[in-house]
Image: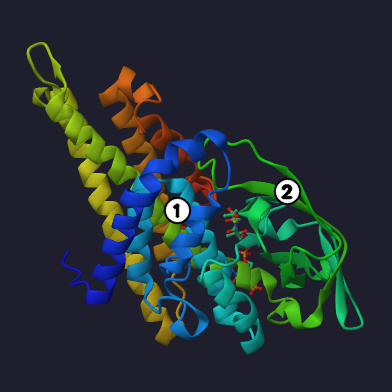
Amino acid sequence: MDLQLTEEQVMIRDAARAFAQNEIAKVAAHYDESGEFPYETVKKMGQLGFMGIEVPEAYGGAGLDTIAYVLAMEEIDKVDAAHGTIMSVNNSLFCYPILKYGTETQKQNYVTAVATGEKIGAYSLTEPMSGSDAATMRSRAYRQGDHYVINGAKSWVTNGPAADFVLLFTMTDPERGHRGITAFIIETDQPGFHRGRTEDKLGVRASATCEIHYDNYRCPVENRLGEEGEGFKIAMTVLDSGRIGIAAQALGIAGAAYEASLKYAREREAFGQAIGQFQGIQWKLADMKCRLDASRLLIYQAALAKEAAKTSGARFTTEAAMAKLFASETAMFCAHQALQIHAGMGYSKEMPIERYFRDAKITEIYEGTSEIQRMVIARNELGLR
Ligand code: CAA
């Protein structure tokens, strides 16, 4: 597929590749080990435009399109998926919804700061008892004059420990089920906002994740995103977009695992020849390459569908779910094969293969598990929604 990239798309891809190789590669293992949030590199990524790739320049972004975004995501994630996760939350889950549904004041106050990397954003849908079944949340907000008073617990908030702002989804009218959910932009330095423990995770360890508790948090009415009851639709629309970014992240991890395997298959010898001469290794490489390219095509298809939706208003739910499903399972497949090809070396922390293996797993879980993606694709194909 010749996508005929524009000059700007090539520029952002090359800039992301150079930044990842020159700045992130040297710190990735350290942050993976410590689990600290990489403030310094994240700030630089903001200054280079990576935190708001699709954000118009008027709001501090790079003013590019979805293809540019997935190209940059792939390059960053090829080197370190934790930096990619932080980037994806700021771009897809925070800036995108405020640009799409926000007021002019909200865009100026919140998008510009996050797109430039001065501030960190987060997205908060999940609760301790509400993950895949996202509409069943127990947190509540009620209106009191010109404020909403918010109470409840949210979990698995990526960027949560570092976030200056959180896009929160909570229930304003429990009787209406998913139609009673409303979105709010939360400032994390206000009374009633409490961070819980930071999760000790298997992978993407530097992308900090925590619980958040709201205890009579007072959110001004002007920080409501969209109308009351529109929150679930906003959350789902945002995930359609976010899933394309996670697919690109998965492609980056898969590509890194594949390229390391090719190199090792050429260099490592066993029984008097390079291991790449053995059919057992060749078949693994061939399967990895096919799945990588198929993932890339699904991702470009989804990115182009999202671009087309900007004028048609059509949903790209199925394309996004297919890209995320296939690319995340490809990341897991490639990381698994790479570890087997590298054997003991892959199992050791001397090489990043074990990190790819740990990082790949989350792409099958967050922003909707593989089971949810299959459900979404099949429901849409069957016309059940
Ligand atoms: N776009 C717009 N609207 C949508 C939509 C979409 N993609 N998907 C559903 N809707 C609408 C439906 O049209 C329906 O609207 P009506 O008001 O007209 O009825 C409404 O939403 C409810 O839809 P469903 O009946 O299909 O809802 P459901 O409860 O049966 O299932 C689901 C929905 C697809 C399973 C959804 O709950 C889902 O995607 N679950 C996974 C949640 C998820 O991905 N969580 C990850 C959170 S983020 C994260 O991972 C952490 C992080 O920080 C990165």
Q: Amino acid at mark 2?
A: Glu
Q: Give the left or right position of residue 5, taking residue 215 as reference.
A: left
Disc 2 from disc 1: Cα separation: 21 Å
> x%, y% of residue 154?
74, 53
Kind of residue indicated by mark 1: Gly
Left or right of residue 260: residue 96: right
Badge 1 marks a residue whose secondary structure is helix
Question: How far across and how far down the image is residue 117, in percent?
Answer: 53, 66
Residue at 38% across, 58% down? 73
Q: Camera-side residue: 128 or 96? A: 96
Q: Find residue 145 and name its label.
A: none
Query: In x, y percent, where is residue 47?
Result: 45, 68
Residue at (43%, 60%) from the top-left corner? 245
Q: Using the image as rendered, state which of residue 351 and residue 374 is in the foreground.
A: 351
| Quadrant into which the C terminus falls | bottom right
* Residue 145, quarter of the rendered image: bottom right
- Indicate whether 320 appears above or below 270: below
Label 1 sits on residue: 84
Question: In the drawing, what numbered circle is on residue 211?
Answer: 2
Residue positioned 66% across, 40% down in the render: 199
Looking at the picture, does residue 360 appear above or below residue 154?
Answer: above
